[in-house]
Image (spheres, rainbow, N blue to C red):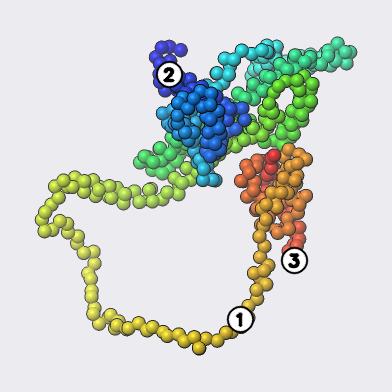
Amino acid sequence: MDHDTLDRLRQTHAAWRLLAADHAPLILSFLALAFIKLNRRAIPAPELVAHLDTYLDQLRETHGTERYPKSARQYLEDWAAPERAYLRKYYPKSGEDAEFDLTPATERAIEWIQALRPQQFVGTESRLLTLFQLLRDLATGSQDDPAARVLEMERRKAELEREIERVRSGQAGPLDATQVKERYLQVEDTARHLLGDFRQVEENFRGLDAQTRERVAISTQAKGVLLEEIFGETDHIRRSDQGKSFDAFWEFLMSPARQDELQAWLRRVHELPAVQELSHEEFVRGIPFLLLDAGEKVHSTLAQLVEQLRRFVDDQAHVENRRILDLIRAIEAHAMRVKADPPYGPRFALLDAQAPEFNLSMCRSLYRPPRNPVLGLEAIEAGAAELNLATLFAQTVVDEKLLRGHVAELLRSRSQVTLAEVTSAYPPEQGLAEVVAYLRIAGEEGAAVDESVTETVVIPPSGGRAEKRVRLPRVIFLE
C-alpha cells in the first residue's frame, strides 16, 4: 500500500478508473442491474442495447437529456474499449451477434459499492464457526503423523456422540430463526463471491491464451522446442494451485450424486419458515446451474487454448517452408533498398535457363474448326425412363424440434435428465441419426458431459435393422 503502487493502480486498474469515471453512477447501476441482479454472465449485444436504451429513457425523464447524450450502443462500445475495459466484448463460436460480459475489475467495483450500504443484519456467529472449522481442518488435515490425525478424529467422534445424546435428551434444540437467517445470508454471500472468482479464473486463462498466440506469431524457434515450452506452461497451469482447485471443484460438481445431494439440501433449506421470511431473490435456488454455467465458460476458454495449439501444429507452411519464406523476405528487403534508386540499364536481371527448350513445329496438331451441332425439335421424342424412385421416398429427416420437445417434457418433472433416460422414454425411431441429433442439441444448449461415466443408448430394431447399442459419455440436459 505504498504511494507509488497506489498511484500506478489509480492510472492502470480498471476498477479504479470506473469508480473515478464521470458517468460512474450510470455504469455501475446499469451493469449491476443487467448482470449481477439477473445473474447473467454473457448477454447478446442487441439485448443489452435494448435494455440500456430503456434504462437511459428512464434516467433522461428525471435528469434531462443533456446528462447522457450518447446512444446506448455508443456507451457500450466506450465501456468495452481497451482503455476502459469495464466490459468484455467478444464473438461466440455460434451466432453472428457479439456478446458482452463483465470484467473482474468491474465486478469488484460493484461489490465494493454494494458493501458501502449499511447492513441491517451482520452475522458474526456463523463466520466465527466457519473460522474455527477452517482452522481445525487446516491444523488436523496437514498433520504428517497418522496417530495425531486419528486422535483428533476420536476427539471429534466423542464430541459428536455427546451432541447426539443432548439431542436425544432434548437439551439441544434446532437452530433458532436468527441463526437460520444468518447462515443463509452467509451461503448467499459465499456463492456470489464464488461466481465472481470464476470471472477472474476465466480472465487468467484468457491471458495465457493471448500469450500463447503472441509467441506462436513471432517465434522463430523450431516447432518441437516451442511446443515443448507451450505444453510445459499449460501443464504448469494445470498443476498450479488455481488449476488444482478448479479441477477439484469441477470434479465435485459434475458428480451426479453430489448434484442430487446439493439439490436436496437446497429444497430443505428453502422450506424453512425463517428462510421464507427473507426478502431474497431466487439466486440461491439456482446456484447449481449458475456454477455449471460459470465452469463451462472456463472450460470454453481452455478449449480455445488447445485449439490454438492444434492450429500451430497444423501450420506446416510456416515451419516446413522456412527457407522459402526467408528467401522471400530477403528479396523484399532488397527491393525496398533499390526502390529509391532503381537500375536503369538495359538488363535489370538475368536468369540462366534451367533446361534447354525445344520447339518442334511439326509436332503441333493441325487446326480444326469447331463444329456447332444443330438440334431440331422435331427429332426429339418423349421417352419413358425405368427408374426406381422408392429410394428417394425412403429418405427420412430427423425432426430436431420433436426431439427438443422430448427433452423439455422430461425436464418438467425433474431438474436434469440424461441422454440415456431420454432415449429410454422415447426410443429412437430413426436409428443412429436420431442419437446424433440429440448430441447436436446437447451441444447447442450447453448440456453437461461427464466423461468419467459411460452410458449405453439402445436403438431398437426397425425396418429390418437389428438392435444397436451405442456407448457414450454421460450427457446431462439441464433446465
Query: Badge 1 is on which residue?
Result: 385
Please tell me which of labels 3 and 1 falls first in the chain: 1
Which is in the foreground here, disc 3 or disc 1?
1
* Amino acid, disc 1: Ala
Local crowd at mark 2 within 10 Å, few (<14), some, or many (≥20)? some
Q: Is residue 28 above or below residue 321?
A: above
Q: Is residue 235 visible?
A: no
Q: Is residue 340 above or below residue 21?
A: below
Please tell me which of labels 3 and 2 falls first in the chain: 2
Q: Is residue 103 above or below residue 313?
A: above
* Amino acid, disc 3: Gly
Query: Badge 2 is on which residue?
Result: 10
* Amino acid, disc 2: Arg
If the image is split into quadrants, where does the C terminus sit? top right
User: Regarding mark 2 in the picture, which secondary structure is present there?
Assistant: helix
User: Horizontal and vertical percent for residue 131?
Assistant: 66, 14
Of residues 455 and 296, the one drawn nearer to the viewer in this rendering: 296
Query: Badge 3 is on which residue?
Result: 464
Between the residue at mark 3 and the residue at mark 1, the CA separation in whole angstroms equals 29 Å
User: Horizontal and vertical percent for residue 390?
Assistant: 67, 72
User: Regarding mark 3 in the picture, which secondary structure is present there?
Assistant: loop
